[in-house]
């Protein structure tokens, strides 16, 4: 069986999961190496996964001829440069979201991939989650009629440590968290967002305003074909990792997600208890595996990436408009001026 040689860059929480999946659960992949600026961490992960090579830089890892593709899971601000470097070395790329934290960096990354003729996938793994896939099939089959309203809630559980803001290596809420919902807003509605109006708050944690971030936001959406939408994001819900989405159409509605960890509840004299979803690595475990498996299979079979760089750009453009709206306190148009050749096609279809 032909195997795709892969290297994973950035083996923190997310990258380590990708490396584990590639090593143990994707038979068509061969995890050749991991790399991390924290070289000792890369070495430990390589030892744990029983692979030979670990590196402290992307450049060193790319020198390996056994690597045909790279998974990038560094913090947000390093994605675009990682894509440019991997593309210049002729490797296909699966990059975590967001594509970049600003539009010029995104254009440069897409142009580098197009120039090198490599394929680029962005890590919008919710498109691979069984519940979202099932919903998309209903939408595509016309079962809810014409989509009218998009609603999405994305609440992370634990209070981020202040150091997460101080490091400034990740994008603010819209780029790091809401970006998933901006992608779903396009994908499930099969339409483009043209205008956004963002409301934000730091009321319960004013100290993070100095890092240009917010604790929670609601973003109202206006679509090209006339539909509307609303997305709520909150980084410290405390009670659970709570991700839910609804698409309301002319003939019905499709509701995705549940705050319950499993569909079972415990009933006793004290009442009813039910464990709640508490982490993205458990809630979206199936999606992360399906995502890397699909990437590997498409690369091996010379097919385009399912979730393209262009998808990454369009979600990013919505995030940029939302940040502008937050800063200017008014509705803003979603625009981007990228004139380069699209990297892969804009994809709306389900698996
Ligand atoms: N798709 C999802 O659901 C999801 C979930 C979590 C995180 N993410 C994304 O994954 C990325 C990583 O997040 P994380 O939670 O794993 O962060 P993390 O801090 O746990 O891990 C980041 C790793 O990258 C390394 N690193 C930092 N700068 C580097 C560089 N320049 N070169 C090489 N390595 C570098 C760090 O040493 C660390 O090991 C982020 O972009 C985040 O937005 C996506």
Image (tube, grey):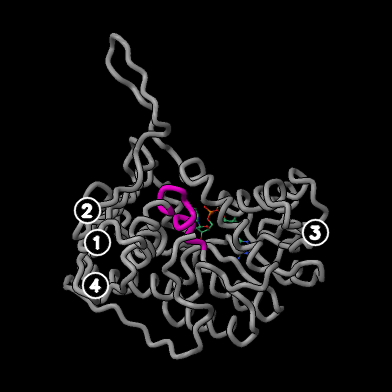
Nearer to us of marks 1 and 3 is: 1
Left-right relation of 179 to 327 = right
Q: Quadrant of ligand 1?
A: bottom right
Report which quarter residue 185 is drawn in: bottom left
Report which quarter residue 112 is drawn in: bottom right
Q: Earlier in the sequence, mark 2 or mark 1?
A: 1
Instruction: Tell me where the magenta segment starts and ends, as one range.
Output: 123-133
Would residue 170 be seen by someone viewing this image from the given angle?
A: yes
Which residue is pictured at 44% across the width and 55% down the height?
126
Circles 2 and 1, Cβ within 8 Å, touching? The answer is yes
Query: 334 or 30: which is nearer to us?
Result: 30
Q: Disc 2 versus disc 4: distance between alpha carbons?
A: 19 Å
Would residue 211 be seen by someone viewing this image from the given angle?
A: no
- Which residue is disc 2 drawn over? 252
- Badge 4 element: strand
Left-right relation of 97 to 252 = right
- Which residue is disc 1 drawn over? 145
The x, y position of residue 264, in whole percent, is: 39, 26
Q: Is residue 242 magenta?
A: no
Which residue is pictured at 64% across the width and 83% down the height?
117
Q: Earlier in the sequence, mark 4 or mark 3?
A: 3
């Amino acid at each position: 069986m032909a195997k795709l040689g892969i290297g994973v860059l950035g083996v923190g929480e997310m990258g380590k999961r990708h490396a584990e999946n590639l090593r143990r659960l994707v038979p068509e992949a061969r995890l050749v190496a991991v790399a991390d600026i924290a070289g000792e961490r890369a070495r430990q992960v390589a030892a744990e996964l029983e692979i030979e090579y670990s590196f402290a830089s992307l450049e060193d890892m790319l020198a390996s001829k056994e690597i045909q593709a790279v998974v990038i899971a560094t913090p947000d601000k390093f994605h675009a440069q990682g894509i440019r470097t991997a593309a210049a070395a002729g490797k296909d790329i699966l990059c975590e979201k967001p594509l970049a934290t600003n539009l010029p960096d995104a254009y440069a990354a897409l142009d580098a991939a197009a120039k090198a003729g490599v394929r680029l996938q962005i890590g919008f793994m919710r498109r691979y989650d069984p519940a979202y896939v099932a919903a998309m099939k209903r939408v595509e089959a016309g079962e809810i009629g014409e989509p009218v309203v998009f609603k999405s809630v994305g609440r992370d559980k634990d209070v981020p440590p202040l150091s997460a803001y101080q490091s400034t290596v990740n994008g603010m809420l819209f780029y790091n968290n809401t970006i998933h919902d901006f992608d779903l807003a396009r994908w499930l509605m099969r339409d483009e967002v043209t205008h956004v109006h963002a409301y934000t708050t730091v009321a319960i944690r004013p100290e993070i305003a100095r890092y240009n971030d917010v604790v929670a936001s609601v973003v109202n959406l206006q679509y090209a074909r006339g539909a509307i939408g609303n997305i709520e994001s909150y980084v410290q819900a405390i009670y659970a990792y709570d991700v839910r989405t609804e698409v309301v159409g002319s003939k019905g509605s499709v509701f995705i997600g549940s705050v319950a960890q499993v569909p079972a509840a415990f009933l006793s004299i004290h009442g009813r208890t039910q464990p709640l979803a508490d982490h993205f690595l458990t809630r979206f475990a199936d999606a992360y595996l399906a995502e890397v498996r699909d990437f590997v299979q498409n690369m091996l079979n010379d097919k385009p990436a399912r979730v393209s760089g262009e998808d990454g750009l369009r979600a990013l453009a919505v995030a940029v408009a939302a940040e502008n709206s937050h800063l200017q306190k008014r509705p803003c148009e979603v625009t981007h001026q990228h004139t380069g050749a699209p990297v892969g096609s804009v994809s709306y279809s389900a698996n």
